[in-house]
Amino acid sequence: MDERAGFRKAVFHPEAQDEYDEILAYLEIEAPAVVEAFREELIRTVGFLEAHPEAAPVERGSVRCKILMRFPYELYYVVEPDRLRVLAVAHQRRRPGYWIDRQKA
């Protein structure tokens, strides 16, 4: 673990990783000019959360939600003693709460 105060490495739930990959694939087809901007925004957001894991508000139980800037997506994650577990990369207006069962895995 990184020695910096509050730093926890982010680990993506397999389905959250799939969502991220699907978003990139969709953007490659529909909006190729923004693919890199989306990738950079996600990396920036994850880096911020790794350094400040409790910065985002609690959404449900112990799950926190961080809205991405410039894109209609949000990260749902849980702060654990040694890591951040990213549960979902979710579109803000589609299927609310679909990721809830991922907390158990």
Image (cartoon, rainbow, N blue to C red):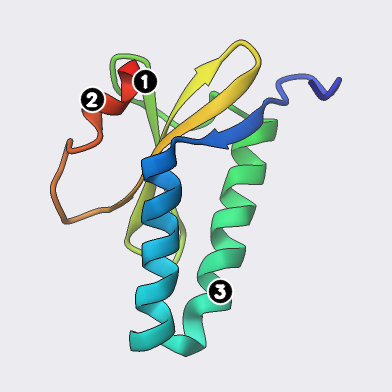
- Say which quarter of the image contains residue 13: top left
Amino acid under disc 2 = Asp
Residue 80 spot, x, y in % from top left: 55, 15
Amino acid under disc 1 = Ala
Q: Which type of secondary structure does the marked residue at label 2 adopt? A: helix
Amino acid under disc 3 = Ala
Marks 1/2 in contact by CB < 8 Å: the verdict is yes
Instruction: Tell me: residue 58, above or below residue 23.
Output: above
Marks 1/3 in contact by CB < 8 Å: the verdict is no
Please, which residue is most extreme toward the left here? 95
Instruction: Tell me: residue 96, above or below residue 6.
Output: below
Q: Which type of secondary structure does the marked residue at label 1 adopt? A: loop
Residue in the foreground of this view, choosing between 89 and 45? 89
* Disc sitting over residue 23 in the figure: none
* Disc sitting over residue 101 in the figure: 2
The residue that disc 3 covers is 37
Residue 66 shows up from this direction: no
- Say which quarter of the image contains residue 87: top left
The residue that disc 1 covers is 105
